[in-house]
Image (spheres, grey):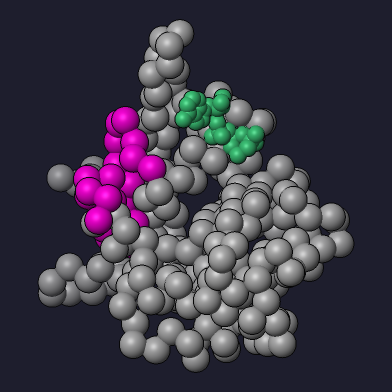
Amino acid sequence: MADAPAPRAAVSHGPPNPSAAPALHVAGLGKRVTLPSGELTILEGVGFEIARGDVVAIVGASGSGKSTLLSLLAGLDTPSDGNVTLDGATISTLDEDGRAKVRGDKVGFVFQNFQLLPSLTALENVMLPLELRGDDDAQSPAREMLRKVGLGERLDHYPKQLSGGEQQRVALARAFVTRPSLLFADEPTGNLDTNTGQAIIELLFAMNGEAGTTLVLVTHDDHLAARCHRTLRLDSGRLVSDETR
Ligand SMILES: Nc1ncnc2c1ncn2[C@@H]1O[C@H](COP(=O)(O)OP(=O)(O)OP(=O)(O)O)[C@@H](O)[C@H]1O
Ligand SMILES: [Mg+2]
C-alpha cells in the first residue's frame, strides 16, 4: 500500500510497553444524567490524547462541563459513553475498586475547595493516600513533602488551623506524595486571593516540573491557561478547540 501513511516511529520492540502509552487517551466520552424534567447531556463526543509530561489547560464557560470532564478523566466518576485510558489502564470499564486502585497508583487530584479531611492533621492528610494503597512507610515521604511545600513546622495542625493557601499547600503535598503519573487540578486557585493563588500556581508548576508529571488543569484564568502547553476548550459539553502553543 504505497499510499498508506507512514507508521509512527517504533520506539521499542518486543512486548507492548505500558510506558509507551499516552498519559491519557479519551474516546467518544459522554455523560448524561436523568433529571425529573428529562435527560440532560452534560458531555458529548469528547475525544483527545495527552502526551506524557504535557501541561494542558481545560477552559470554557461556567457550566460547559469542565469539572465533569475532569472527574471522568481521573476515574472519580463513570461515563455514560466512551472510554478513558489512563497510562494504559482503561478505567471506564473497571468497577469502583479497580478505579480506586488505578487512582491510588497513578492519579493526584487538587480541588478548588482543598477537600482535606477536617479530623486529620496536615501530616495525616498527606499520609492517607500512601496508607490507603498499603505503602509500608507513609510518614517519611509525607513529612518530606510537607517540608517541600513550606509546612514542615505545621505537621500537627488541623485544616481549620490553617489558612486557605496553607490548606491548598497541604493538598498539593497530598497530590504529589504518591508520585502520580497524572495530576488533575480543578480551579486550584478559585478560593484564594490573587497573591495567594499566584503562589500556589508557582508551587504547583515547580513541583510538577520537578516530578515530570502530566498536568491537566481546569481554569478560568487566561494567564494561567497561557502558561500551559496546550488548551482544550469546552462549549456546552463539546470539545470545540484544541490549541498547542
Ligand atoms: N450530577 C448532576 N446532576 C445534574 N446536573 C449536573 C450534574 N453534574 C453536573 N451537572 C450540570 O452539568 C453542567 C456542567 O457542570 P460542570 O460542573 O461540569 O461545569 P463547569 O464547566 O465545571 O462549571 P464551573 O466553571 O461553574 O465550575 C452544569 O449545567 C451542571 O449543572
Ligand atoms: Mg467546575
- Residue drawn at 48 percent across, 87 percent down: 139
The image shows residue 118 at horizontal and vertical percentages of 59, 62
Task: Judge whether residue 8 can be spotted in this image.
Answer: no
Quadrant in which the N terminus is drawn: top left
The image quarter containing residue 236 is: top right
Q: Quick check: is 82 in the magenta stretch? A: yes
Report the side of 23 relative to 111 (left or right): left
The relative height of residue 88 versus residue 150 in the rendered view (above or below) is above
- Residue drawn at 70 percent across, 82 percent down: 154
The image shows residue 181 at horizontal and vertical percentages of 42, 69
View extreme (front): residue:
119
Q: Quick check: is 113 in the magenta stretch? A: no
In the image shown, does 229 or 172 lie closer to the viewer? Answer: 172
Q: Which residues are magenta?
A: 77-97
View extreme (top): residue:
37
- Residue drawn at 57 percent across, 87 percent down: 143
The relative height of residue 34 versus residue 127 in the rendered view (above or below) is above
The image shows residue 179 at horizontal and vertical percentages of 45, 76
Number of numbered discs on residues: 0
In the image shown, does 215 or 144 lie closer to the viewer? Answer: 144
Report the side of 85 relative to 141 (left or right): left
Task: Judge whether residue 68 can be spotted in this image.
Answer: yes
Tell which quarter ligand 1 is in: top right
The relative height of residue 158 versus residue 7 in the rendered view (above or below) is below
- Residue drawn at 59 percent across, 74 percent down: 121
Report the side of 165 relative to 23 (left or right): right
The image shows residue 131 at horizontal and vertical percentages of 38, 76
